[in-house]
Image: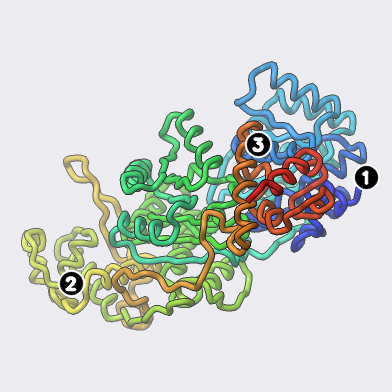
Amino acid sequence: MSSPLSILRQVFGYDSFRGPQAAIIDHVTGGGDALVLMPTGGGKSLCYQIPAIARQQAGLGVTLVVSPLIALMHDQVGALREAGVAAAFLNSTLDWPQTLDVERRMAEGETTLLYAAPERVVSERFLGLLDGLYAQGQLALVAIDEAHCVSQWGHDFRPEYRQLALLAQRYPGVPRIALTATADALTRADILEGLQLPSAQVFISSFDRPNIRYHVEEKKEPLAQLLRFITQEHAGEAGIVYCQSRKRVEEMAQALAQAGIAALPYHAGMPADTRQAHQDRFLREDGIVMVATIAFGMGIDKPDVRFVAHVDMPRNIEGYYQETGRAGRDGLPADAWMIYGLQDVVNQRRMIDEGDAAEAFKSILRGKLDALLALAEATDCRRQRLLAYFGEASEPCGNCDNCLQPPAVWDGTDAARKLLSTIYRVHEMSGLTFGTGHLMDIVRGNATDKVRQFGHERLSTFGLGADYNEHQLRAVLRQLLATQAVGVQRVLQGDGRAFDTLSLGASARPLLRGEVPVLLRQASAPARRARKPRRHAPAAAAAELDAGAQVRFINLKAWRAEVAREHGVPAYVVFLDTTLAAIAERNPATLADLAGIPGMGAKRLEAYGALVLQVCQERI
């Protein structure tokens, strides 16, 4: 059996491990169970791929990789095959003869890693195949990717993942490794319990993604704000825009396309073939912007996503972290940009409050939403806040919006008391509750037809907040919702239409008494962000190359695109941009010059070395 380090060098073309990779790989190769938390782009896949290769060399058989998405399986299997590793997948894209061929090669020991979805893994037919391998001592390892899907507390719970616990009962002695980029303490405990991994060693890498810049601003004109962000800072670059609803996805994608941006929609309501075509374009073409619901993204390995934008607030920090982590997997500068507003908070709180879950479960969901809102409203370093949520201490990053342009702060305690008093007096007078717009009209002294209809201009709080603008009052209401001083209820009208109403919550009393201050960021007009100098070209990996190396890099990218088309894989599966940039900078003349370049393993050197040299030696 080769050592893990020699496998890393020979197969994957890298000289050394990063962070806790070496310890994880040694533990799992030796037969230990593990739970691995490592940020996106941190090298999680090597933590089971190298043990799989090592254990297969030792005669222990095939490694099963449980993966939730077909696109992820295809990318990882394609990359492994490019590196000379015998990998395969079983999914719905294969016809019956192809399926039988994969199963035969697995049974005959010709496969090192086999990828399959959890639904297939727990099927009787598949379990029968595993039974046969286990009986022959040829089931080397089980790797469960995206393991947060096991947990009911996670942001992407999938019931079929819970069934994977049967692997522990059915195949005792086979080591298992569960991996995820996102899990707080509660989710980690649930993963260990749900997968029956009581003795697993837990490896927690830093959650920090220093190459990602976090920026959050108040939602005012969503499309205009998004267009300004993309056109001014990421023109021609690949990105993902997340929206809460399918309708909003369609509208945003169409508007971006009309503005000349190569944007495509993606959501679960689209025909499957259209979704697949859009995903393929995003993975294989440069500069595509995918506008999507959270149905898109998990397991997407595209390394050169330069931004992730949220035009609606996610449900919790775990979801936000997982989604923003899809930017900058190549380690180059990337942006996580989000806009949010009062209606986002109202909608999220209402969905929690009106759900069918037990109150204890709802309380945890509210806490997770409140933590995300606290991150959005923060006036200090956002990265510090984000890392602290996952239990990691850090210093101010100097690279988020708050560090680069510290916001002004104002005392919203008086405004909060006036809003709470108005909610109380409206209910006392009318026996009804009303929505945000009506309450703000009362506080600001706007005698609208609706205000006069209910006689609310006679309330003692009418006009008391005339010196506050709408943006300020909305910011105060967001805080009141976050602290559960205000609750949300959906009311059905006689015509079947529904609207959200506000009522006093459990923590309203100390605020009404002025015992708890409400400090808020100063609302301001949208302005172009203060920025540090940074490199953001479509060829970001090659930004510091000289003129000759830039030309070699462009030629190498064109050659790589042809190879990728021939092999039916995304270009980054053949070589990463960072590898091409290193080749272009070295300007190799011999195969020996290519050896040792990060990402240039033995199989790739054998398959592509002569062609790479030919491209590099073309006349400039």
Name the disc covering residue 320, or none: none
Q: Residue at x 77, y 58 (%)?
A: 21
Horizontal relation, residue 317 to residue 600: left or right: left
Location of residue 98 with respect to 122 vertically, above or below:
above
The label on residue 563 is 3
Residue 587 in which image quadrant: bottom right
Q: Around disc 1, counting alpha carbons within 10 Å, would you say few (fewer than 14), some (14 to 19), or many (20 or more)?
A: few
Residue at x 53%, y 64% (from the top left corner): 535
Report the disc number at residue 443: 2
Callout 1 secondary element: loop
Q: Amino acid at mark 2?
A: Val
User: Closer to the observer: label 3 or label 2?
Assistant: 3
The residue under label 1 is: 1
Q: Position of residue 600 (x, y in %)?
A: 76, 49
Q: Are marks 3 and 1 in contact (CB under 8 Å)?
A: no
Helix, strand or loop at mark 2: helix
Q: Tell me if 118 is positioned left or right of 349 in this view.
A: right
Q: Does 519 appear above or below 376?
A: below
User: Is label 3 or label 1 in front?
Assistant: 3
| Nearest to viewer (mark 2 / mark 1) | 1
Which picture quadrant has residue 270? top left
